[in-house]
Image (cartoon, rainbow, N blue to C red):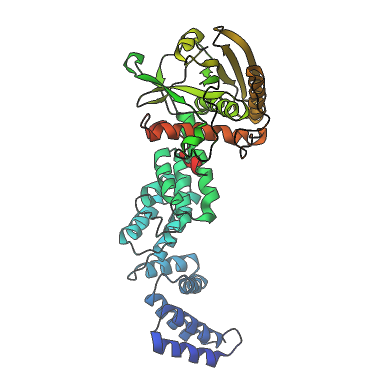
Amino acid sequence: MLKNGQLDAAEAALRAGMAKVGETTALLTNLAKVFGERGDEARAEATLWQAVRADPNFENGLLWWLAIERDRGGEDGYLRALRTVAALPGSWRAQLWLARHHLEHNDVEAARALYADVLAGGLFDGGALMMLSGDLGNNGQIALILELIGRVYDEHKHDPMAGLNLLQACQELGKVDEGEALLGRMYALDFVPIKQQLDQFAHAFMEMRKQAAHGTPVNAENLTISTITLSQPVWHYGLRNADWLFSKKAQDAPEVGFFALSKTAGGTEGAESQREDELGRLTRAIPLYLAEAAHYWSDYAVSSYFQIVEGGGPVVSGGEADANALFDLVPGGMRYFVTGEIGCTGEGEGMQWRVALTLWDCIARAKQTSESGTASSAELGDLVLRLESGILTRIGLKREQPLDEFYQRPTAAVMSVYLPELGQALMLTLLANGHMPKSAMWGERAMLD
């Protein structure tokens, strides 16, 4: 009605509404618009001020009243109006706008005091922290975002954009622990519109951890090292003994084994403890995949072997494995086993991986053959598939169809995802069985995607 010029009808409807629910801020603001349309500016301003006093945080009414005062008195009039509203009981929006003015004029302490008062009062709405954090960020006060908002932000009550601003502040300030803690809380909301942004922060924090990671020297004599043996593909274990689903190898099937790869030696290195990194994960993921391939595409019974420090996690050895010691370790029915090394040079797109595998003949107790190659990160999947083909050809007993009809060999295109998932599955298996602490893992969030 107001838009159509039916001012009398609009006033009547508004007054009828007030008779039912009282003189709310929204109704009073719209009544002031009616008076303004009639040209009764004095009555419009008086009614608008009544609306602002009823709720000093109602944005539409407050913006209109401030615009009037700015037209009347310029910037000084606008600031006086803000201070007037800020003095009203329950006001917080005017304080935030005053604080923004102080930030823009480099008066950080004045802004900080206003923010502290608003946050201490606890009367602000769910979007206030988004505005506050945005203003601080836009004016370079990143540390204040964490200091002021980190303590009061509740992802269940406040705008998720404020949470994203907090995460950005954590990233810029290098506060990985705080960032990952908040990230976990925000993921738990299961709020799809921000999922992609949360994933980006998860990746950023993971990269920051990797860059900051450093080994802690340990005394090798105090470590309890044992060997974990897997007799089926690692992801079978997560299905909790689903024997009804998987086909079995013959009882008298010859055996082939796969050992974790060693890290290519790069000088003298002492024993140290560190979080899992990409190289360490690949020392396990590649033999896990090769064991899976042999399980499904050959008639061998397959085992894979991984050394672990009890209570610490997997061992990454440096240099070539001692085959003579391994001949004595494997079961008597073992026909072949595979060892290898992996190393990388360069960084980013220039990173080059080198993988070398050795097939050992347990009857002759001698090296049977070697397979090796180099590849960029993007080409690593192709290299692994070539190495797989070479090893399966050498050991023989190849199958034309996979052991389970549903199984499909991963393509090179998906191998960059599949290998890390195998490595993660092993770590989760070790974690579930009490062989390692949670702190030894990285990229946990990606395991859920």
Observer-nearest residue: 305 or 384?
305
Observer-nearest residue: 281 or 326?
326
Observer-nearest residue: 333 or 232?
333
Residue 166 rendering spot, x and y as whole percentages: 44, 48
Q: Residue 22's image quarter?
A: bottom left
Residue 401 rendering spot, x and y as whole percentages: 66, 33
Residue 55 rendering spot, x and y as whole percentages: 39, 74
Q: Is residue 439 above or below residue 197?
A: above
Q: Is residue 42 left or right of residue 295?
A: left
Regarding residue 22, the answer to whether it shows in the image is no
Q: Residue 227's image quarter?
A: top left
Q: Residue 343's image quarter?
A: top right
Determine the residue positioned at 64% across, 27% down: 380
Regarding residue 189, the answer to whether it shows in the image is yes
Determine the residue positioned at 36% across, 58% down: 114
Query: Quarter holding the N terminus?
Result: bottom right
Residue 260 rendering spot, x and y as whole percentages: 50, 21
Q: How many marks?
A: 0
Q: Is residue 443 left or right of residue 56?
A: right
